[in-house]
Image: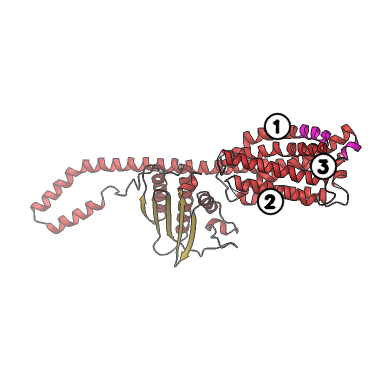
Amino acid sequence: MVSFHRILETAIFSMINLFPFMLLALYPFRRQFRFGKPVTLLLIFLLMAVQVGVGITAAFADKEKGILSAVSTAVYVLFYFVGIKASFGKMLFTLLMLSNVANVVTIDAKCLEGLIFGAEMARQSYRFTYSVCMLLCSAAAAVPIFWYFRRYYSDGLSKQSGALTWNYLWLIPATFYLSWFWHIYGSSESALEIAMRPSSALLMLFINLGAFLIYHTVVRLIYELEENQRLASRNYQLAVQSLQYEKLSRQIDDARQARHDIRHHITILDALLSAGKYEQLHQYLQSYKKSLPDGNPIKFCEHYVVNTVLLYFQQQAAETQTAFHVSADLPAQIRIPDEVLSVLLGNLLENAVEACREVQNGKKEIIVRVRTEEDAFFVQIENTCGNKTVRDGENRYLSTKESIRGGRGIGMESVRNIVLRYDGLFEAEEREGRFCVSAFLNLSAGEV
C-alpha cells in the first residue's frame, strides 16, 4: 500500500516540476487571457490538480510512463488553447520550447540527485531529495529564461510581422521535443538509468542550448522583419513628402508665371475680339488652356499616410504612362496604425505599377478603391498586366519579380500577414489581361 508520505513526496515534485514553467509560459501572453481573472485562476488550479494526479499515477505505475508523459503534455497544451486567445503558432512554439527546457531540468535534476545523494536514492522515484535537486535546477533555468522573455521574447511575440510564419515555426521546438522523447522512451534502457548518466544530462543540456540559440535567431528575424516593414513605411512617407513639396513648388511657380503673363494674354484676346476674328480667338483660348498649370489633385483623401502613398505611386505610374484613377473615402483618422496602412497599400500598388511596366502595347491603367466603415477597411486595386500570372502549389499568385525564381514574393506575403492579423479576407484574380486584388480588414479583430 502506498503511504501518504510517498504521495506527498510525489505531489510536491509535480508542483515543482509544473509551477515555474507554467508561470513562464503564461508571462508572454499575460494580456491575452480569454477569460477574466477568476475563471483563469480556476483553470490554472484544475491544470495543477490534473498534472499532480498524472504525476502520482506515473510515479507508481510500472509501465506506460511514456504514455502518461504524453497525456500530461496534451493537457498542458489544451489549457493554453482554452485559456489564452493568441496565435496558434506562437502558443505552440512557446509551449514546446519550455517543455524542452523542463525536460532537460528533469533529467539534470535526476543526475544531480544521483551524484549528491547516491545512486540508490536516485533510483527511487520522486523522493524529497529529487525535489530539492529539481528546485535548484528549475531556479537555474527559470531565472535567465524569465529575463530573456522580459527583454526579448515577449516583444518578439507582439510583433505583427511574419504572422503566417509562426504557423510553421513551432516545428523547430517540436523536432527537439520528439528527439528527446525518443532518446528517453525509445531506448531499450530505462528512462531512469539514462537520466542518471552524466553524459546524457550533458548531452541534453548542450542540445537545448543550441536549440535556444535557434529560438533566439527566430525572434531576431521577426524583429528585423518588423524593422524592415517600418523602414519601408517611412521611406514611402519621405518619398511622398518630397514629391508633394516638389509638386506644390512647381504649381506655385506656374501660378506666379501665369499671373505675370495674364495681362499679355488679355491684350491679345481683346485685340482678336475687337477685330472680330472669332476663329483665331477660339484657337488661342484652346492653346492657352493647354498651357495652364497641372490640375491633378494633390489630395486624394483626408488621411495623411494613405494620401501620401497614393501620391507617390501616382508619380510612379505617370513615369510609365499609366493612367492612375483613385476613389478614396477615408477620414483623417482610422483604427489602423500608419505603418500597417503604408505596408499594405505600398506593396499592392508597387506590384500594380510593376505589372503595368511590363505592358508593351495598349492602354495601361491602375484603379484604386479604398474605403472604411465603422469596423471594416476595404481596398481594391485593379491594373492591366502584360505577362501571364503564375501560381504556386497552394494556388497563390506569385509576385512578377519573384516568380522568375519561383518565389512567392515578400510583398504579397506581407499583405497576407496583415489580413490574417485582422481576421480579414484576401482575394486575387486575373481576367482578360487585368489583375485585381481585394483586401478586407476586420478592425475589431485587429484591436484584440
* Cα distance in 3D space between marks 2 and 3: 21 Å
In this picture, residue 213 sits left or right of residue 315: right
Numbered label attached to residue 35: none
Q: Which residue is mark 3?
A: 203
- Dot 3: element: helix
Which residue occupies the foreground of this view, 311 or 426?
A: 426
Q: Residue at x 39, y 52 (%)?
A: 370
In this picture, residue 293 sits left or right of residue 76: left
Q: Are marks 1 and 2 in contact (CB under 8 Å)?
A: no
The N terminus: image quadrant: top right
Q: What is the x, y in percent for residue 108?
A: 81, 38
Numbered label attached to residue 171: 2
Magenta range: 118-137
Residue 205 is at least partly visible in this image = no
Q: What is the x, y in percent for residue 382?
A: 42, 59
Which residue occupies the foreground of this view, 287 or 313?
A: 313
Q: Which residue is mark 1?
A: 143
Q: Residue at x 33, y 41 (%)?
A: 248
In this picture, residue 67 sits left or right of residue 301: right
* Amino acid type, mark 3: Leu
- Dot 1: element: helix
